[in-house]
Amino acid sequence: MLHELATTFGSKDLLDKIIAENPDRKMILMAGSDADEGLQLVDVSGQPTVFNGGLAYRVQLHQGSTEWQGFFSFKYFTFDQDTAKVFDAKANRLASNGLPSGMTAMYVLTKEKNANEYVLLTIWADSDAYALWRHSPAFAPFDPYAVSANHFHSASYHQVTADEK
């Protein structure tokens, strides 16, 4: 089971160099759905980060597949302690009731150096399945958190394929 993961952002050349220098690690290169999101490299080896200035996270909750393929949605939040408890309960409820159609995995992450910073990472078969969930009543428990008061922002990515490399 994965207990931690790390991410970093950069140019294709820089991220390819990191991958080449760390052949023993499972790293996923992702391209943003929007051009301004750029490239992200996610180290899912579970080992301490090798990234300089990267972001390290603890896995608080995981449900579903351990395969890292498909469409990736990252939702970022900053919570106070009470809000975090309620959010955790809602995420646990979603995980225990079976993942929505098309969602292959869900991770709740907290930043290693600031446990109040959360990421809801969901992995989908495709972007259409994600869009259906995002605009359905099933997403309603998470809607109250998607506000500026929680420093909310989101980004979506797809895995860079061999053709794109």
Image: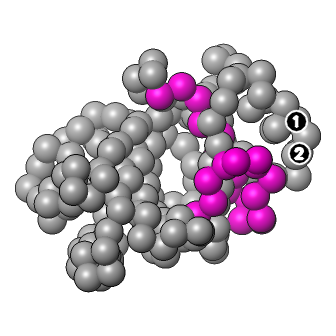
Looking at the rendered image, the quarter that the C terminus falls into is top right
Q: Residue at x 47, y 35 (%)?
A: 157
Cβ–Cβ under 8 Å for marks 1 and 2? yes
Looking at the rendered image, the quarter that the N terminus falls into is bottom right
Residue 107 location in percent, x, y? 46, 63
Determine crowd level at label 2: few under 14, some 14-19, many 20+ residues with C-alpha closer than 10 A: few
> Outermost residue, left direction?
137
Residue matched to label 2? 23
Determine crowd level at label 1: few under 14, some 14-19, many 20+ residues with C-alpha closer than 10 A: few
Apparent side of residue 62 relative to residue 81 in the rendered image (left or right): right
Residue 90 location in percent, x, y? 24, 74
Kind of element beneath mark 1: helix
Locate residue 88: give its quadrant: bottom left
Number of the label disc, if any, that sits on residue 37 = none
Identify the coloring: one colour
Residue 58 location in percent, x, y? 57, 70
Looking at the picture, which amino acid does disc 2 mark?
Pro
Q: Is residue 14 above or below residue 133?
A: above
Q: Residue at x 21, y 56 (%)?
A: 149
Instruction: Decide which of 70, 155 is in the foreground and name it.
Output: 155
Looking at the picture, which amino acid does disc 1 mark?
Ala
Instruction: Decide which of 88, 79 is in the foreground and name it.
Output: 79
What's drawn in magenta, residue-wise?
Answer: 37-57
Q: Is residue 120 above or below residue 86?
A: above
Residue matched to label 1? 20
